[in-house]
């Protein structure tokens, strides 16, 4: 049995952390002028500088040994080949197959899934081309002008982040809206600005049973019917789901249901039909460029030696910071306004994947696992929370992310943006302890950071960046021996919400005094208003 914390390598890392506790990152550079060159890596148009971490050569070598002695090599091969590695749900994990641009088969239960994936992409291409060209018309003969993606979690965060990041590639005559929150204010605000005759709704839910998404979709359907007098929603609603029957029951035509597979996890699903909004926004060809960028990172992850492997290095540095230096959080700071949704996307990716306390054998772990991931764009963060990072008592590693070339002709702004990022990374490492300053002005420095530089924010480079973080999370989960691909904590909340919704109406008293007291207040103020029942099926069901 794989016992991480009792292994010789783990114990050596504990001793190294104690031995090097007073080391200064700046001294590593003084002692080794080649440190930057040794601890940086280029892959395509992505450059990683990890030299500003509190990590010695000996520590890095030992971390590589930790990875070598873990199940990493085996589970990586199993993931790419379609073996079941999500053991609690008994599923393969094959988001990598969705962006496989090679000719090699990927076999699940004796069947190569690549032909089905290519057919799914072809359907995505055909539909997105029709909408973008104006060939696809609404019920009144007008072309579609507004796209509304209704989903939550992975059905929202990934497509939303990518569409906003690649806004400069967006179709000029289409507007995009994302509705995720079940709070009615959200959908009300969006719908108020739309014309039902020219609006296309994408109902994005893997199981077609997610309460928040179905309530929002039902509200959108009712708004469409009330404002058009139409009972047939066929030209204005499509579904992205594994549950064709439920989508058809809702009123969506069979040919307008874009299916995917149970082995596609929500937070890894933007590469599948869930990425329809992306293809509609930037075009199918550029959607393929996004997949190709991820595929490039996939090949690097599989083929590069661990010491030159970008996802592995970022994962090991994270493990060092979390398990041996005591970091509890990880800040994501993109110095690129187009990436302002990236911290939220990575928050779900990391925290839903590695927020686990039981290992693959069902035993409680005796070490820290996934960190709290948070962040904001620079330079806004400098004037919000950087104060704590510079002078506070918390140990917070940082990932800085930037594009070297501006998308717009704003060279002066972009130069200021990049110099601010470089200044902050420098300040976090070196601090400010010059003679003559007062104690309250002192910044101790020695705060670790990675810097990721993209030549330019393109679909290809964004795909590679996302895949980099996906594989980083996978490597950490594998070394910690936890299942990075289930989310039973999320399922608990869904189940309890359904139960409480029902029991408020029944005036049940089976809950703890606090929950019961709050339920009583809600009941007295709101009554027992339940979500609207689904409208009857339309008369003509698509073939």
Image (cartoon, rainbow, N blue to C red):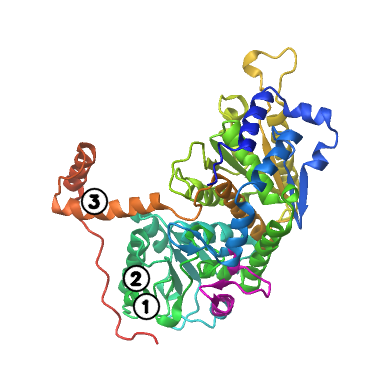
Few, some or many residues within 10 Å of mark 3 (<14, 14–19, 20+): some
Give the residue pinned by disc 2: 221
Q: Is residue 105 magenta?
A: yes
- Span colored in magenta: 96-124
For the residues labelled 1 and 3, say whether their Cβ atoms are less than 8 Å apart: no
**Residue 103, x across and y down, in percent:** 68, 75
Q: Residue furthest right?
A: 33
**Residue 413 as seen in the image, left or right of residue 152:** right
Mark 1 lies on a secondary structure that is loop
Mark 2 lies on a secondary structure that is helix
Who comes first in sequence, dot 2 or dot 1? 2
Q: Nearer the viewer, residue 178 or 21?
A: 21
Count of numbered circles on the image = 3
**Residue 525 as seen in the image, left or right of residue 47:** left
The image shows residue 140, relative to residue 329, as above or below, that is below
Q: Which residue is drawn at 59% across and 75% down?
A: 114
For the residues labelled 2 and 1, say whether their Cβ atoms are less than 8 Å apart: yes
Few, some or many residues within 10 Å of mark 1 (<14, 14–19, 20+): many
Who comes first in sequence, dot 2 or dot 3? 2
For the residues labelled 2 and 3, say whether their Cβ atoms are less than 8 Å apart: no
Q: Does the magenta stretch include residue 193?
A: no
Of tags 1 and 3, which is closer to the observer?
Answer: 3
Residue 139 at least partly seen: no
Of tags 2 and 3, which is closer to the observer?
Answer: 3
Give the residue pinned by disc 3: 500
**Residue 405, x across and y down, in percent:** 75, 53
Instruction: Tell me the tag on residue 233.
Output: 1
């Amino acid at each position: 049995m794989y016992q991480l914390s009792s292994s010789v390598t783990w114990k050596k890392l504990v001793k190294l952390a104690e031995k090097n506790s007073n080391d200064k990152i700046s001294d590593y550079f003084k002692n080794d002028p080649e440190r930057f060159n040794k601890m940086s890596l280029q892959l395509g148009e992505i450059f990683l500088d990890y030299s500003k971490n509190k990590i010695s050569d000996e520590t890095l070598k030992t971390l590589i040994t930790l990875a070598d002695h873990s199940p990493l090599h085996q589970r990586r091969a199993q993931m790419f080949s379609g073996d079941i590695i999500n053991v609690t749900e008994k599923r393969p994990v094959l988001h990598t197959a969705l962006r496989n641009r090679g000719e090699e088969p990927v076999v699940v239960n004796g069947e190569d899934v690549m032909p089905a994936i290519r057919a799914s992409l072809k359907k995505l291409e055909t539909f997105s081309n029709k909408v973008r060209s104006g060939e696809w018309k609404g019920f009144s003969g007008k072309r579609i002008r507004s796209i509304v993606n209704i989903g939550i979690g992975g059905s929202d965060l990934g497509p939303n982040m990518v569409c906003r990041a690649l806004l400069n590639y967006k179709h000029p005559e289409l507007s995009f809206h994302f509705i995720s929150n079940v709070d009615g204010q959200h959908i009300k605000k969006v719908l108020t600005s739309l014309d039902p005759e020219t609006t296309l709704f994408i109902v994005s839910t893997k199981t077609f049973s997610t309460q928040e998404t179905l309530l929002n979709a039902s509200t959108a359907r009712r708004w469409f019917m009330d404002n058009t007098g139409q009972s047939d929603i066929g030209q204005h609603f499509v579904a992205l789901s594994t549950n064709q029957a439920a989508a058809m029951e809702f009123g969506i035509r069979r040919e307008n249901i874009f299916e995917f597979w149970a082995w596609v996890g929500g937070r890894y699903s933007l590469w599948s039909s869930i990425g329809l909004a992306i293809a509609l926004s930037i075009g199918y060809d550029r959607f393929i460029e996004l997949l190709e960028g991820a595929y490039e990172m996939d090949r690097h992850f599989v083929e590069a030696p661990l010491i030159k492997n970008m996802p592995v290095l970022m994962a090991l540095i994270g493990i060092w910071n979390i398990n041996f230096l005591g970091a509890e959080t990880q800040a994501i700071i993109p110095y690129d306004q187009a990436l302002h949704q990236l911290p939220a996307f990575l928050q779900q990716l990391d925290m839903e994947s590695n927020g686990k306390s039981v290992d693959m054998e069902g035993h409680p772990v005796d070490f820290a696992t996934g960190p709290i991931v948070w962040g904001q764009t620079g330079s806004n963060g400098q004037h919000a929370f950087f104060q704590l990072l510079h002078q506070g008592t918390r140990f917070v590693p940082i990932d800085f992310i930037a594009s070297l070339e501006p998308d717009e002709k704003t060279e002066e702004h972009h130069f200021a943006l990049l110099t601010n990022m470089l200044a902050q990374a420098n300040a976090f490492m070196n601090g400010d302890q010059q003679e003559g300053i007062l104690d309250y002005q002192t910044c101790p420095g020695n705060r670790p950071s990675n810097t990721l530089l993209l030549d330019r924010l393109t679909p290809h480079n964004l795909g590679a960046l996302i895949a980099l973080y996906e594989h980083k999370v996978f490597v950490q989960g594998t070394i910690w021996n936890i299942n990075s691909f289930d989310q039973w904590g999320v399922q608990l909340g869904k189940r309890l919400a359904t139960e409480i919704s029902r029991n408020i109406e029944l005036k049940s008293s089976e809950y703890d005094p606090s929950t019961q007291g709050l339920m009583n207040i809600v009941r007295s103020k709101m009554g027992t208003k339940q979500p609207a029942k689904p409208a009857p099926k339309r008369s003509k069901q698509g073939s």
